[in-house]
Image (cartoon, rainbow, N blue to C red):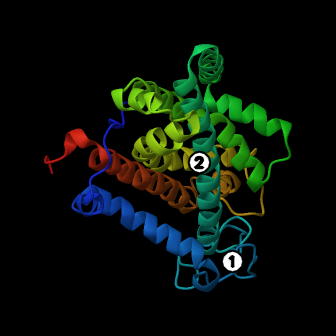
Amino acid sequence: MTVLSAADAPPQGALSRLLRRKLALFGLAIIVLVVAGAVFAPWIAPFAPNDQMFDGLTLEGAPMPPDGKFLLGTDLLGRDLFSRLLYGAQTSLIIGVVANGLALVIGTLVGITAGFYRGWIGGILMRFTDLMMAFPALLLAICLAALFQPSLWIVALVIALVNWVQTARVIFTETSSLATRDFIAAERTLGAGNARILFRHILPHLLPTIIVWGTLGISTTVLLEATLSFLGIGVQPPTPSWGNIIFENQTYFQSAPWLVFIPGAAIILLALAFNLVGDALRDVLDPTQRGRD
């Protein structure tokens, strides 16, 4: 997917153009709501995420449905689902930002190095990237997660190690195109070194692409983290995660469907929100789209 032409800087009115897009505003609203819930969870949540209430289960030992005390009901251990979702948002956002940020750094370094130097250096780096792309991301993440003791930071590292390849390929294509431009040749003629060309001329042109892929990548990271946690090899209980909330309560899918549908809807909405904002950023920062809003 071509994100944008890196030869032009983003327009000065990018933010105002972004805010004129209704779908982007919808996505931003969801992101702000989730971030606010995660940040202020200790003050918003009516209970601690791992508190097992005596009145959190029915007389038969089943989860309580939503009511005045438990806004979204309770889970199989009598814990407040609303509180666990708020704290689970912290887990999803931390892993989303850390893992995607690390993947973005790795992909950018690999792509810009291969695209700028090319030759045998670029060949080795891109063949390794192709090799990594040949493995299904989920299968590779499962294999890596099985080698380490699952924890929040290990899960973030595992996701980063499987998600950098798409960024590397895009950055490589953009950098290869930029490296052949006339203004780069002129800089070389004037005696500019590789470091100056990379940091003063190529990297600034890549920033819009990096921003877009950084936003789009968070949705993929959130989904992958939820998948790993649902499979039991991600963030481990009792640390709340939207994925392991579904995993823990899947046996109550028919008798207490809110335990599956509500965290599942939260995962889908957050991923959709980042996708909407990322798509809007791609259009706003693409110089070929100027004047079409």
- Find residue 275 and report its horizontal and vertical position in percent: 40, 48
Residue 8: where, in percent of width, then height? 30, 41
From the image, tell me which residue sits under label 1.
56
- Whether residue 167 is visible to the viewer of this picture, yes or no, is yes
- Residue 115 locus on image (x, y percent): 52, 25
Q: Is residue 106 left or right of residue 37?
A: right
What amino acid does circle 1 point to? Gly
Dot 1 falls on a residue whose secondary structure is loop
229 up-or-down from 123: above or below: below
Q: Nearer the viewer, residue 206 or 33?
A: 206
| Label ID, residue 100 | 2
Distance from label 1 to label 2 (Cα)?
A: 37 Å
State which quadrant residue 104 falls in.
top right
Kindly identify the residue that appears in the image at 51 percent across and 61 percent down: 262
Q: Residues within 10 Å of mark 1 (few under 14, many from 20)?
A: many
Closer to the chain start, of discs 1 and 2, is 1
